[in-house]
Each structure stands twice: as structure tokens, then as C-alpha cells.
Amino acid sequence: VLFADIAGFTAWSSLREPAQVFSLLEALYGAFDQIAHARGVFKVETIGDSYVAVAGLPDPRPDHAIVMCKFARDIRERMVAVTKELGTELGPDTAELGIRIGLNSGPVTAGVLRGDRSRF
């Protein structure tokens, strides 16, 4: 399981219009989703500036840890590129945003909580 959030997002977003915040999140999560698709990673959800994804679920795979580490590396690199690209549109301090990534491996439980998508 990968948990990622944008370092500096709260302060950055407090100085922006809602459309600018949306523009950043749309660009980042769109890029992360493309990488997830290419690597066979399942995005569980996004909540604000947090991104949660899993490898090896719902279909088990023996290389889940390797895949998730590569995914983490890829989104870190893409984060740098996207925030740099958006600097002129959203302000130069956009490139100063970072990403915190946490990984965990082990047993999980899945279920449906008041909706139609599994949660892990």
C-alpha cells in the first residue's frame, strides 16, 4: 500500500484560488493515474492532497513490492516535473512543493463501506 501527500500543500493552497488548486491536483493525479495504469497499480482513492494506491490487489502478484517501489519513484519524479511545468501558471513557489511517500506491505482486508468500491 502506498500513501502519498503533497508537502507544503496547505500553505500553498491557502494563497491560491480554488481553480488553481484544482488545476494542480488535476495535473498531478492525472499523471499519477497514468503511471499507475502503466505499472498495473490500483488507485484506491484520493482525498484532498492524499493519494492511496495498492499493488497486488485485487489480483495478487509476486512482484507487488517491487512494482510499488518503482511506482513511488516514478510519481516522485513526475511530481517534480509537473510542479516545475505549472510554475508559470500557478506561481514560482509551486515548484517548491514536495511529496511524502509511505509504503507498507503485509496482510490487508477489503470491503465495501457504503458504496460500490472496495476499500483496502
Image (tube, rainbow, N blue to C red):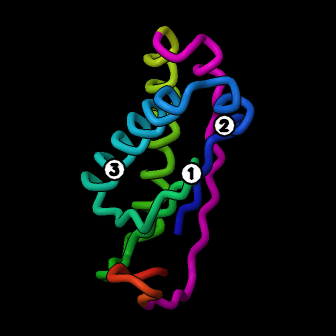
Q: Earlier in the sequence, mark 3 or mark 2?
A: 2
Q: Earlier in the sequence, mark 1 or mark 3?
A: 3
Which residue type carries mark 1? Gly
Disc 2 designates what residue?
9
Q: Which mark is residue 48?
A: 1
Determine the residue positioned at 62% across, 42% down. Answer: 6
Determine the residue positioned at 51% across, 24% down. Answer: 83
Q: Indicate the quadrant where residue 97 lies.
A: top right
Tell me how far mark 3 sits from mark 2, CA to CA: 19 Å
Could you tell me which secondary element the residue under label 3 belongs to?
helix
Labelled pair 2, 1 in contact (Cβ < 8 Å): yes
Q: Position of residue 71 (x, y in %)?
A: 43, 52
Query: Could you say which is closer to the camera, residue 30 or residue 1?
Result: 30
Disc 3 designates what residue?
33
Dot 1 crowding, Cα within 10 Å, few <14, some 14–19, many 20+: few
Determine the residue positioned at 39% across, 38% down. Answer: 26
